[in-house]
Each structure stands twice: as C-alpha cells, then as structure tokens.
Amino acid sequence: MVQNLVQNLGLKGFLLLFLFALLISKSVRAQQPSLNLMPMPASVQAATGSLRVDSSFSVALTGHTEPRLERGVERFLQHLSRQTGLLLSPKPGNSARATLVLHTDHASKEIQEVGEDESYSLEVTSAGAKLTAPTPLGTLHGLQTFLQLVDVSSGGFAAPAVTIQDKPRFPWRGLLIDSSRHFTPVEVIRRNLDGMEAVKLNVFHWHLTDNQGFRLESKKFPKLHEMGSGGPYYTQEEVRDVIAYARDRGIRVVPELEMPGHSTGFFVGYPEIASTPGPFKIDEEWGVMDPAMDPTKEQTYRLLDQLIGEMAKLFPDHFFHIGGDEVNGKAWDANPKVQEFKKAHGYKSNEELQSYFSQRVQKLVTKHGKSAIGWDEIFVPGVSKDIVIHSWRGPDALAAAAKQGYRGILSNGYYIDLMWSAARHYAVDPLGGAAADLKPEQKQLVLGGEATMWSEYVNWENIDSRIWPRTAAIAERYWSPQSVTDVKSMYARLDMISQRLEWLGLTHRSQYRKMLQRIAGPATPEEFAALKTLTDVLEPVKDYTRGESTSWKAITTSPLNHIVDAVPPESDAARRFGELVDKFISTSCSDADTGGRLRAQFVSWRDNDARLQPLAQRSFLAQEVAAKSQDLSTLGAMGLAILDAIAKRQVAPDTWKMQQLTTIEQLKKPQAQLLLMPVAAVQKLVDAAAAGGTCIGNK
Amino acid sequence: MVQNLVQNLGLKGFLLLFLFALLISKSVRAQQPSLNLMPMPASVQAATGSLRVDSSFSVALTGHTEPRLERGVERFLQHLSRQTGLLLSPKPGNSARATLVLHTDHASKEIQEVGEDESYSLEVTSAGAKLTAPTPLGTLHGLQTFLQLVDVSSGGFAAPAVTIQDKPRFPWRGLLIDSSRHFTPVEVIRRNLDGMEAVKLNVFHWHLTDNQGFRLESKKFPKLHEMGSGGPYYTQEEVRDVIAYARDRGIRVVPELEMPGHSTGFFVGYPEIASTPGPFKIDEEWGVMDPAMDPTKEQTYRLLDQLIGEMAKLFPDHFFHIGGDEVNGKAWDANPKVQEFKKAHGYKSNEELQSYFSQRVQKLVTKHGKSAIGWDEIFVPGVSKDIVIHSWRGPDALAAAAKQGYRGILSNGYYIDLMWSAARHYAVDPLGGAAADLKPEQKQLVLGGEATMWSEYVNWENIDSRIWPRTAAIAERYWSPQSVTDVKSMYARLDMISQRLEWLGLTHRSQYRKMLQRIAGPATPEEFAALKTLTDVLEPVKDYTRGESTSWKAITTSPLNHIVDAVPPESDAARRFGELVDKFISTSCSDADTGGRLRAQFVSWRDNDARLQPLAQRSFLAQEVAAKSQDLSTLGAMGLAILDAIAKRQVAPDTWKMQQLTTIEQLKKPQAQLLLMPVAAVQKLVDAAAAGGTCIGNK
C-alpha cells in the first residue's frame, strides 16, 4: 500500500506527506499532557483558539434522535453545570445555532452488541462545536470527550479548539464488580456506571453469585436469594433499573452465575445440587472453598435450565457468564457416586468432569438464546466456537484460543483487587505476550478486557477508591491506540480525571478523608495532619498477602474500618517523592531546589511520629500504624543523613552503605497489611550516595 | 420556695445540699470539654468506665413501641455503623439483655405539638445502657445523644459511663430554609433534616414563596407553581414525603406563604391580586421589591381562602406562617383605588392597611383550623392572642409582645445568611435584652427561635456549609440551659459535631474542597495547597454587603462558583491563629514554642503568593483573589517584622506603629466580597509590640 502511494504521489510528494504525518503525530504527542483527555482519542489535532463555555451554552440534537439521546444531553448539561457551576438550560434544543451541535446518523441496535460502531468525530472551534457519530453510542462517547475538554481558563470556562477522530481499539471494555463477597448497594453501582461512562467502558460484568452469597432474586427458585444471600440481594426490579441505567450510558450488563465451584450461595437453599451433603451456610472467609455442584445429577441441570431461562429473560445482553473457575475437586473426590460416574464415562480427571459440566451448561445457555462466556476453564476441546473465553490466565491462553478460532477477553493483569499501581495495569495489553504474534484476523478474536473488582475487602465505603482512578488507566488501554503508553502523561491525566470523577458522585477521594477521621476520632488538626502525612505514603500490601494472613481471613464478618481499608491502593505522595528523587539523582544530586525540597520532606517525616503518637495512643485503629509511624521517622532521619553524606561529596565507607541497606530492608516489611512506599526511592538515594554512586562519582 | 426548703431541712442540711449542688454544677462544667455532646444536656453526671461498642452491639425497644421508633432505631444503627465502620445487626430486638435498652412510656401526639414532652434520661455503664423517655420524641433525642457519646478509644469504640437527664429549654427550635431565592432539591432538604435531628432541632420552617419563585404545587391554582416557579417546584407528593421524613425525626414542618409583600411569585400567574398592573415576572435580583398584594380586593381574599384551605390540609402542623415582612408600600401608594380604600376606612398609614390585611388573613388561617405565625409586622393592636410573632426585630419586640400575652419566637441574631461567626450567634439569647426582665409566666411565652437560611447566595452546593456547623451552636442555645455559654468549649465540640454531620451525608466540609478544585482546574498539588492556604483564612463579607454591591446583585441568574461561595462563613484557621496570638501575648510574648509556631505561620503566608500566582493567572476564578493573596503575603512579612521587633524588646517609635496600623487598615478592605481574617489578630500583635504594649512593657 505504501508502494502504491509512492507511485501516485511521486517520491517528493510522498516525503512531504511523510513529514506532515510526522508533524501531526508529534503534535498529538505534544498535545497529550496539555489536553486532559482519558482515554486519549485515536486522533487529536490541536487548533488555535478556544470555545468559551458560559451560561449561554446550548446543545442541539440533529439527525437521528431518540429519548436516550435526549436524556444523554440532559445528563451532559447537568454534569457540565456541576463541573463549572454555571447555570445552563437543562434541555437540548434543535437549533443549528446551538453552541454544540450533535448529529447522529442512525439508531444503534435494540440490544447493544459487541462490535457496534462507537466512533465519533468532534470539532471544536472558537465559534462552536460539532459532534457527529454514526450511532448514539458514538454520540454519548463524544459528549464525554467534550466534558473533559472544558476547563477553567484566564478568560472563563472554555474548551480548546481541536479536531478529534475517535473510535475504540477493542469492542469489549469491561469492569467486573463482585457483589457477592460484599453486597454492592444499587446507588453504588449507579455511580460506578457513571464513572464507566466517563472513561468509555462499555461492559458491566455483574458477578452476582459466589460462596459468600447469592445476590439475585429468582422467582423460580426463591430459596436461592432468600436463604443464599444472607441478607441483601437485588430484586428483579432493581436489576431492570440497573440495566436501563447502563444502556442509557452505552454500557452492556453481562450477568455471571458462578458454577460449578464458587457456588455455596446456591447450596444454602438447594443442597440437593451439591456434590457433598448439606446443610450449607454461606462462607465468611477468604479463599477457594471446596463445595461444588454435582455434575452427575440430572436434577442439577434441570434447576440450571430453568434458572438460566429465567435470567436470560431478565438480562437482555447476548452473553451470559457461567463462571467456571477454581474448582479444587475435593467435593467430587469425596463423593463415591461422582467417582462411579467418572469411571462410567471414562473421565480420567476432575478437569474432564468439569468439561462435561461446562458443555452441558453452555448448551443450556445456547438453548435460551445466549452465548456463553466463562473463565479459561470452559475452553475445552470441542466446545462450541460461539463461546467467549474470559482469561484470568493471561494473553498466552487467549492466543492459544484465538489460534483455534475462539474469541476471548483478558482479565489477567487487570485484577484491581491486587492493589497494583495504575502503571502496572497500564503496561498490560490484551494483545501482549503470545497474542502479539497472532495474525491480524486472529487478533480480531481478542475482544478486549475487563478490570475485576473482587470484593473480599471492599464494601460500599471503599469500593470507589479501589476502582478509581486506576480503572481509568485500564480503560485507556482498552480504548486508545496501542502506541499510547507514556506513563508520565497517563499519571498527569489520571490526576485530572480522578478529580472529575468525584463530580459524578464517586467518593474515591473524599471517603478516604472521612475514614481517616473515624480512625482519628476527636483529634486536633495537627494530629490529624500527622496521621494523614503518614497514611498518604502507605499502601495496602499487594497480591493475596492480606487474604493469606491468618488474622485477616474473615471477610464478611470483619469491619473494613482499618487504615489498610482507607488508604488508596496507590500513594500519589510516594510516587511524586520518587519523581523528585529521580530528578535529584539525574542532576548528580546538585540541584539545590530539589535537594532543598527533599530535605524539607525528610524533616517533616522525621518529626511526624512525635506529633502522631498521642493520637495513636488514644485510637486502637491509629495504633495499628504506630510502628509504621516510627519507620517513617527513621526514614526521614536516614534521608537527612544521606543528604548530608552527599553534601560532603566524599566516598562513604562500604559499611555505611551496608548499614543503610539493612535499615531499608527493615523498613520494607509490611505491618498491619501496609507498606511504607517511599523506602524504594530512598534506597536509590543510598545507591547514588554510596561509594562510586552517581552523586559521589560524578561530582 | 427556698425559704420552705430551709425550714424543712434545717440550715445545716440546706447548706450541705447547696454545697452538693455546687459540686454537681462544677462537675458538669468540668465534663463539658471532654464529652463531645452538642447540644449539651441539661444535666450530665460522669461515672467511671465505659461501654464497649462492637459488632455484638444490640438495641431493644421496650414499653410503648410504634413503627416510627423501629425506624428510628434502624436509622440509629445505620448511623452507628457508618460512624464506626462496624457491622451491626440492622434491626431492633426486644431482649432486656440488649446493649442499649430503650423504654418509651407512651405515644406522643398524632400531630406533633409545641411543648410536648421531649425529655429523656440516659444511663451508660460498662455493662450496658438504658434510655428512658415519656414519649418517642425523647427517645429519638436520646438516641442522638448516645451516637455522640460513641467514639474511638485505645480499646475499641466505646461510650463513656455517664448519667444524663435532659430536656429542652425552649419548645420551638427551628431552622428556616428559603426555597424560593434558590430552589432546594428534596434530597438536600432530607439531609438537612438529618442534621437537624442530630442537634435536636424540632421545627423545619419551609419558606416556600417569595419574589423569586412560588415553589409549591397548588391543585386549585396551578398557575402559581406553573408560572410562578420559573421552573422547579415541590409536588404535593414530595411535600408529603418531606413531612413524613421530618415527623420520623421529631421535626414539625411549618409552611410559609409570604404575603402581602415578597409575593411576586403569586403575581406571575395571578396578576389580578397585585396592587399594580402586570404582567409580572419573577425577580432575579437582591433586595426588597415593590410589588404587593391588593388588600382592598375581595378577589385577593377569595384566592387566599381557597389556597390556605388547600395547604392547611397538605401540611398537618397546627401553625401556618403568613409572612408579613418588608412591605415598602410603593405599590399601594401607586394605586388610586388603594388610596381611596385607605381614606374610606380611615387608615392613616400603609402600616394600618397592612394590619387590616394581616387580620383578615389571620382569620382565614383560623377558619381552616390553624394558628397563624408571622413576622413582627402581624403584631398589631387587637390581633388574636392565638398568633405567634416571629421576630426579625429582636428580643425587645418579643418582650413587648409577651407583656401583652402574645407568644413569640426569635430570629433576630440567628440570620445565618449574614455570615457571622458561630460565637456571635451563640451569644444571642431568645430571653436576652428586654426579655430577660420578663416575669416567669411571660418568659413562657417566648417559645424559642429559628435560624434563618435566606438563600440569595445559597444553592444545593453550598447550602450545607452556610447552615452547618454554625446552626449546631444555635441549636445548643435553644436546647441547653441558659448557663451553657463557654465559647471555647462550644468551638471544641462544634468541631466534632461538624465531622459527624458529614457522616449523615451533609457536605459542608467536602464540597468546599470540590468547589476549590473547580476554581483551581488542572493545578499541581502545590498550587492547590497554596490556594487552600489562602482561602482557609478568607471569609465572605458580613451582613448585606454582598447584596448591596452593584456587581453582585443578580442572585438567580449568576453562578455561585466564586471563592466567596466556596469558603465557609467562618474560618477555623483564622480562629486558631487568633487563639495562638492571644496565647503568645498572654505570656508577654515570651513563650518560645508559640512564638516559633507564629513565625512558621508567617513564613508560610509570606511565601504563599509566589506559589499561587501561576494558578491565579490561569483561572479567572482564582484571579479574583490575586490581590488578597498579595495581602496575605504582606501580612506574613509584617508578622515576621513584628516578631523581630518584639524579640528586640525595645520601645518601637510611634511612627512604626502608625505605619503598621495604616497597612492593617489596607488589609482589612474586602476584595471579591472576601475578608482576610487574621488581620485582626496581627493588629493585636502590633499593639502588644508597640511602645508600652504588653510585650515590650512587661519584659
């Protein structure tokens, strides 16, 4: 294709075009930090000037219209009004002289489908803005982009002049919320759907059943929710409301009934379909549990047939998630009849038995007019090509499936319950690993990914801070071109989107403060500031460390009011401190301003413990971090000593370095399931300061 | 009575009793700072130990029960759970072994009445707690007291052992919300009713009509809300919901239809009852407007008769507020027929004409089974003793009315829209001024007071911060013994209650931060901190200064997104700084620690402007405080110079003092409707430092 182009343009013309393309791509990159968009659009062309946004701002709907679009514009105007404080006319008009004119070509599908056209283009000039899209899905996305463009300026609120052509990279961009381990109140789901809309996610994967509770009303099998929920569950009416709310925001709702493992919630009311004898009660602890459905009984399939039939009607989406992960096989090993069944059918392993179960359930899903999606385990030889594989294993598993013609989505790398940094999730690509080498048509089978909010240690109060803002970075991975990978730009924009998300009612920032206030009780402003200085640089332990700690196993019966529950998964303060240290080292530790800021930071840390101790003695919750507070003090004193050593510009003895590193190792140890995050950057300083290090050597 | 007591006990016994009483009253006072209760109960007896509050906490209802009490306990448990993060059983039981046992003697009135028994007693020991009350009103109040007792401690959450006997000083403890100038969404009203419950206020005075909008649906006169609201209004269904919500919290709802002035809202749809010709449109500006009802037309009274009849059915309360204030008479002077009417009836003034109107409307209210309440103006010779006078004029007016046997409530001194400090409102007593000299039976006629939230510059976003926490201090004035006047204790407790009020969903603290973020736009953390350092010591101008400023007159068409809209009415930081200065001066400026803290504060202020300027240049909203930012910098530099002068312990020349005071006067000038609050304390330092001042003279 390039060859043809060269022939048509002549070499000179081609080179000019090439240079122009370079310029454009450069201008896009240069724009990235200044345009606070997330996800970054496929193409952004900055222009001159800006569009003033004031009380006269108006929106018109042209082309195809529908009530959903009108509601979308009303919501847009409400958000714009909240974001700016401006009084705006609350309804769309149809005047071509409106400030923002929307044009939608035609309707989207009655039931939103995977791969529908979600593209849009948006042109903003100082005279007005025009947003055009083939379908309402694109229009809704474009409205969110416009909202992100509007910001305060020296002359009032304004959106910069720009031309944007945008469409998603992947058609399946999801967030899973586990409403079983901890129930998620409907209003919490609603505000998170608002957050999803803001960052252009389009699948809400609702994990409704698990060992800790069956959360979905069944009219056919009422004991499922009455006995299996342990209290709170969603009525079908509420489910319908959530689905309508999501559809209004261009979001599909995919329900998951987890089976044959993770299904104690089923067995409390219906022990007869379990592989081991009852009675059962819903689990309260962290971990993979033994109970599993009895895959040998026809009764099991009769119940599932009716239940799936009932729920297939309730949930309009074309996909139905049947779970399938983490069956440890113990319940089957313990049941002689299951063993007989395996023998009779020639199954050599429990995996083969699970394959049999999966295929039967998948056929039930098909019978009720849906396609099955399930975790890696449902991908077994001979299964219908209609399924979608949901991979917790990784891109290699997806690649293997794609090579055989199976579609898949990735969640490995997007487990936001593991408390990783946004940067770490951001680096994961659904087409990474072995998937990078797939042929183009095979790559098409990788539909996207889902961030998974497993809720062992997550409730109404801290769920927002576990999902946001990190999920916005993941959403960018699913939406934006693969080349958008600049971590620094990502964090700069993440900061802004995080602030905006709170205008939607999300509480990921404000609730942190409230939870700290609960922990602090009647504290002086100074004591509270000392507590926050400490907790601002703490992060929860990573991966499954907390769940594996003996004293933190209870997940549904233990209050989530500890500091580990309050602090965000990622410390902004520690990240910024790390950047400061990097900057200092990059100047061979000679930049006086940076050095001065580091010194001030170390002094504040060194002195913080004395201010915090009275509070720690009064509050059992603050007491949990008393040791970490001393560690921060130690780290501050250490930092000052290192800066002093650097200032001398003398080679420090090896024993000095060894001592420092020994202390560093001590400070790295978690306490109360918390990590002191600035330690790593101080370690870099030690290296830079020690004999032969950057700061001593290069001076 | 004392004489009888002395005779019965003998002098010795009496003296012992007297000493005992002294001891008790002393223990109450000593308790005040450590028990974070607001309003302070009538009697508090501290005991030893505390009651642990953990997940096993339970509540039982004994004696009289009713659904309202059950809902009250559920709400209590929900709030306790939010406040502590504990997982609590969500329902009350009836076991005498519950942690907190409630006993209610009997039902309260079907429609809550003025002066019903609201007393309760609460005994907390390390073994459990018992709350007893004659009526559910007392039980509900006691639950709020218990909630305030629970706090974090070294051993877990706990309530201190204590015996409380409590009852209100005044039976009418109200908050007026003006929903006309700016419409108050129902959810905002709900969360403010929650706040009222928390501080034991019992009257929600709903100001539903004014020049800026008629906000109440009328089935009989639909043009009132359709044309007169300019958009948003309350449906009767919503009104019923609010009334039920309030009743659940022991709160009466008193509606106000403001007339014959402040009534443009009526005239948009029904110009025929106005004294001047239409057409009318609702007002957008600040001020007292000319239009008034035509008191000479029978048509006016026919409409009011039917309207009051309709609303008397909708609002169950025994009282109906008919407004009556601020008729400037211009509309009557301009109407020849009104002039004829005055002449024919022998009325010499418009006041006499208004008396005629008031008496006719008051009779309509009586006809529909209610008692009228209205502003001072309705108190005219010969009016029925059934009325209640709502005084914006002051305690002297109330005293004059009481001497003639009329009941009254006070709002003068409680106008929270005037941006006064909590201390200033706290110092106002409904039985102050001339009312202090009333006879006991006359004092009984002073029923209490109402804080008034006039909403010229108040909308959904900042209303919470205008009402709270200051209204909690006013609520204490209405509830607690007259002797509870310690301002320092009040502020200490106000801080705590303010924090707790946010758990109820009030946003007075969190929204300030969000509004600042809107103003700051995409700012660095350092820039944002600089903005907040400045705004934390700014307060809105006082009294009617803002409304009287030409460029700030538009109240319904101007966005409330300025810094003056965001900052709280009272600066905590400035108050604390003032306390620090007082402390320093009280040690003859010799306490090194305090001096050091002052110095650090001055340095931070001096250097703040440089950090803030880049942001001020980017944001037109931040730009408004650029001058005040320079002022803060000046103040910081000045403070440092004063400390230096003090350190020399030399007599400073008079010219020095003059210079300082000239600068002080400059810094006191408002800008962008904002005042720089720490100036007054720095002025004290100047006095202390200057020749002969405390700090120079006493060394």
Image (cartoon, coloured by chain):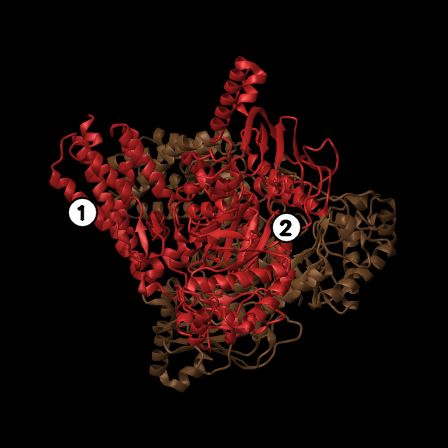
Chain colours: A brown, B red
Q: Residues within 10 Å of mark 2 (few under 14, many from 20)?
A: some
Label drawn at residue B160: none
Image coordinates for residue B315, horizontal then vertical, percent: 62, 58
Q: Which residue is mark 1?
A: B662
Quadrant (top left, top right, bottom left, bottom right) of the C terminus of chain B: top left
Q: Give the residue type at disc 1.
A: Thr
Chain letter of mark 1 equals B
| Viewer-closest of A606 and B447 | B447
| Viewer-closest of A378 and A39 | A39
Give the structural element (helix, strand or loop) at label 1. Answer: helix
Q: Which residue is mark 2?
A: B247
User: Measuring 42% from the left and 56% from the top, which residue is drawn there?
Assistant: B515
Q: Residues within 10 Å of mark 1 (few under 14, many from 20)?
A: few
Specify whether B185 is left or right of B276: right
Specify whether B233 is left or right of B674: right
User: Measuring 62% from the left and 54% from the top, which residue is drawn there?
Assistant: B317
Question: Label 1 to label 2, Cα distance in Å?
Answer: 56 Å
